[in-house]
Amino acid sequence: MDSYFSTFHTIGEVADMLLLREPKLKLMVDISLDPPGHEEAAFRKYPNRTSYSIFDRKLIDRFLSETAIGKVVELRGSFSQAAYIPHKTSYIDTVFSIDSFSVVKFKPHETRPDGWSSTDGARRQLH
């Protein structure tokens, strides 16, 4: 039986990606919190985001080859609290570590009932 302690499962649109090589290899993936259609009212395309991280090299390579900004993905993983300052601040550092993912596939021009539609987006070069 699977353990559900400190795990997450989310579906969302990839807003941005950043590959960091130091101090430890990780791919940071921002997932948009905004509903479809938010672009018309926003200054930037994805103003509200949550950051997730991939630490496994093979999973990083697979994510970069199968996804792009604008793709809808389903993520599963675990989270942990790395740092916390308990008084007079709201600073809490939580790491969401992606253990698996899949690209949500739509038929061309299909829109789901919740408003998500298929988009290809442009891949951003990461160095």
Image: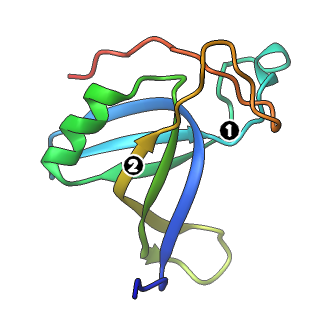
Q: Position of residue 17 (x, y in %)?
A: 39, 32
Q: Under tag 1, what secondary structure?
A: loop
Q: Residue 111 sits in which quadrant? A: top right
**Relative to 33, does residue 18 appear above or below in the rendering?**
above
Q: Position of residue 52 (x, y in %)?
A: 44, 51
Q: Is residue 25 visible in this depiction of the protein?
A: no
For the residues marked 2 and 1, what is the alpha-carbon distance in whole angstroms?
21 Å
Q: Is residue 111 left or right of residue 28?
A: right
- At a point 23% along the width and 37% down the height, the residue shown is 62
Q: State left or right for residue 15 relative to residue 67.
A: right
Image coords of residue 28 (percent x, y): 36, 43
Q: Which residue is mark 2?
A: 101
- In-front residue for pair 113/28: 113
- Which residue occupies 59% across, 83% down? 86
The color scheme shown is: rainbow
Q: Which mark is residue 48?
A: 1
